[in-house]
Amino acid sequence: MALLRARDLAYGYDGRSVGHGVNLALDAGEVLCLLGPNGGGKTTLLKTLVGLRRPLAGAVWVEDARLEQWDAARRARVLGFVPQSAPAAFAFPVRDMVLMGRVARHGLFARPDAADLAAADAALARVGISALAERPFTAISGGERQLVLIARALAQEPRILVLDEPTASLDFANQDRVLSLLAELAGEGLAVLFSTHHPDQVFAIGSHVAMLRDGVLMAAGPVGRVLDAATLGHLYDRSVVVGEVEGRTVCFTRADRP
């Protein structure tokens, strides 16, 4: 049985349907990449998969339980979610921002204990931003804030980690760092799901891919079976080339158009 499943899922907001007929499965140790054009419904789908929005139809299951029956505290102990960004309204130290990932284990007003502090420091180190621990969240760059959000989710010690375009605001080196980290986490048994606009990232670390356009899954399955020049061309309405460079799969669009 898959750890996370969507069955005949329809999703949206404010009474408006964004997508429908979504069937997905994610197991421990897998990396599922959600790939598709802007405006295709990726963010709304991810929010529905982690319980931040209720399905319009169908259901999300975690193991043998429907997620909509869980309270927020139970969800947060299993599901870690990293949004695209977070408002920097308050000058909390970075370590305190990461400690907020421990709230699900003790309640909103509980004082962090030694184990919480250790988990926060370990998450900062894992992401490579220990040097930012005392800096105000409002005084660091957008890319650094994204790394803090990833550390906060890791501090939760979730079983499923869901990330919405986690590398979008990062420089080249930090993109590579985050992708390597996600691959390591999957190797340690986490179920990882992230959205991206970069097929190269899917080829680099994905075990499975789901290709979403206009709220509909065009294809889903193992990367080696599903993702190729033809399916990418259909997804993006472009002529695509897929090739190998020094042992890595890369893709790019041709100058001509189909």
Image (spheres, grey):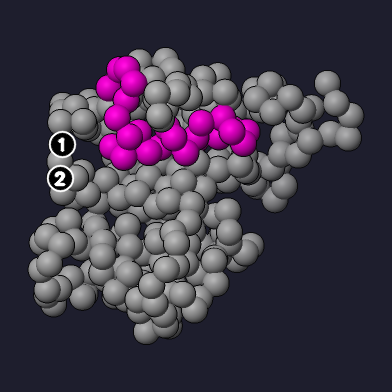
Residue 101, position as x, y percentages in the image: 26, 61
Q: Residue furthest right?
A: 256
Q: Secondary structure at mark 1?
A: loop
Q: Residue at x 58, y 40 (%)?
A: 203
Residue 183 located left or right of residue 58: right
Mark number for residue 98?
A: none
Q: Is residue 211 visible?
A: no
Residue 64 covered by magenta stretch: no
Asked whether residue 114 is in view, the answer is yes
Q: Quadrant of the C terminus?
A: top right
Report the number of discs. 2
Q: Which residue occupies the foreground of this view, 239 or 246?
A: 239
Residue at 54% of width from left, 65% of height from top?
A: 143
Write down the region rendered in magenta. 32-59
Q: Up-down: is 101 above or below 201?
A: below
Q: Are marks 1 and 2 in contact (CB under 8 Å)?
A: yes
Horizontal placement of 242 versus 146: left or right? right
| Residue 219 location (% of width, % of height) | 53, 20
User: How many residues crowd mark 1 within 10 Å: few (<14), some (14–19), many (20+)?
Assistant: few
Residue 46 spot, x, y in % from top left = 40, 37
At 50% from the left edge and 69% from the top edge, which residue is drawn? 144
Image x and y of residue 246, in percent: 70, 50
Three-letter amino acid code of the residue under disc 2: Arg
Q: CA distance from mark 1 to mark 2?
A: 6 Å
Residue occupied by mark 2: 74
Residue at 32 percent across and 17 percent down: it is 57
Question: Label 1 is placed on what type of residue?
Answer: Trp
Q: Quadrant of residue 32?
A: top left
Task: Judge the density around disc 2: few (<14), some (14-19), many (≥20) Cα neighbours within 10 Å.
Answer: few
> What number is the disc on residue 70?
1
